[in-house]
Amino acid sequence: MFARLRAFLTPLIARVVEQQLTQDVVPLRGPFSEERQRWLGLELMRRLGFDFGRGRLDTSHHPFCAGVPSDVRITTPYNADDCTSSMMSVIHETGHAKYEQNLPAAWRGQPVGNARGMIIHEGKSLFFEMQLGRSRAFVNVLAPLLAQAFPAEGREVFAPENLFKKLTRVEPGLIRVGADEVTLPRHMLLA
């Protein structure tokens, strides 16, 4: 199965990258303050239904989610040059957190009341990041939030169509955490 996936992905990535050369994307200009990125992350968590009475957002060098259903901690790094990096990390980690926070409290200690493992966890968080966070409908929600957080950046940068192109851009790279939905499986094949 992995051999077939590798054989499929390699030419697909090359074709997509070549096709993207014909697309214009207005680049981010920054700098983006950590304070405003944090505000954006908290606002996204709130809109995604994160329960702040049972968790919080902190800063770290690598994004992660840890804790127990009654105390779920999310961390994210901030990049002064690219506010979407932290934003997508927060969306991903909120997927993990929502899974933990929504486990049935009445069944704690029983299989149905405990997390079923990293496959389910990662599936939920990748759904939040890759499908929800990059969907056109969600981009229409993100665009005004980004414009509110970073008004100096200019309207064309956070116009929904430009933002959609930026968030769905396929860019091969060495860092798995920042991988897009097409190159992420290549990272997983290496693991």
Image (cartoon, helix red, strand yellow):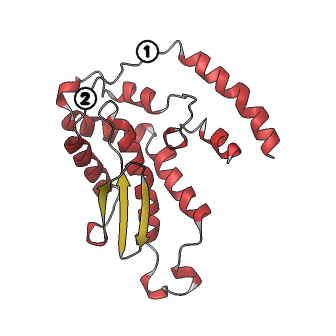
Q: Which residue is at a point 26% across and 42% down the rendered structure image?
A: 37
Mark 2 or mark 1: whose residue is earlier in sequence: 1
Tell me: residue 26, above or below residue 111.
Answer: above
Q: Is residue 34 left or right of residue 90?
A: left
The kind of residue tagged 2 is: Pro
Residue at point 25% right, 33% down? Answer: 32
Instruction: Identify which residue is drawn at 53% across, 51% down.
Output: 126
In the image, residue 72 lies at what x, y percent?
Answer: 37, 68
Residue that protrudes farthest toward the front in the picture: 61
State the SS at label 1: loop
Under circle 2, the secondary element is loop
Label 1 near label 2: C-beta < 8 Å? no
**154 up-or-down from 133: above or below:** above
Residue 176, label in figure: none
Number of the label disc, if any, that sits on residue 31: 2
Report the label total. Answer: 2
* Viewer-nearest residue: 169 or 61: 61
Q: Where is residue 47 in the image (x, y as percent from the top left)?
A: 30, 54
121 with respect to 92 (left or right): right
- Could you tell me residue 173's position as x and y percent? 56, 31
**Circle 1 is placed at which residue position?**
24
- Location of residue 150 in the rendering, given as x and y in whole percent from the top left corner: 21, 33
Is residue 152 shown above or below 5? above
For label 2, the crowd category at 10 Å Cα-Cα, with few meaning under 14, some 14 to 19 and many 20 or more, is some
**Residue flagged by tag 1: what amino acid is it?**
Asp
Q: Disc 2 or disc 1, which is closer to the eye?
A: 2
Residue at 52% over, 12% down? 22
Instruction: Give the quadrant of residue 28.
Output: top left
Q: Residues within 10 Å of mark 1 (few under 14, many from 20)?
A: few
Q: In this view, does 160 lie above or below 35?
A: above
Q: How far apart are marks 2 and 1 (CA)?
A: 21 Å
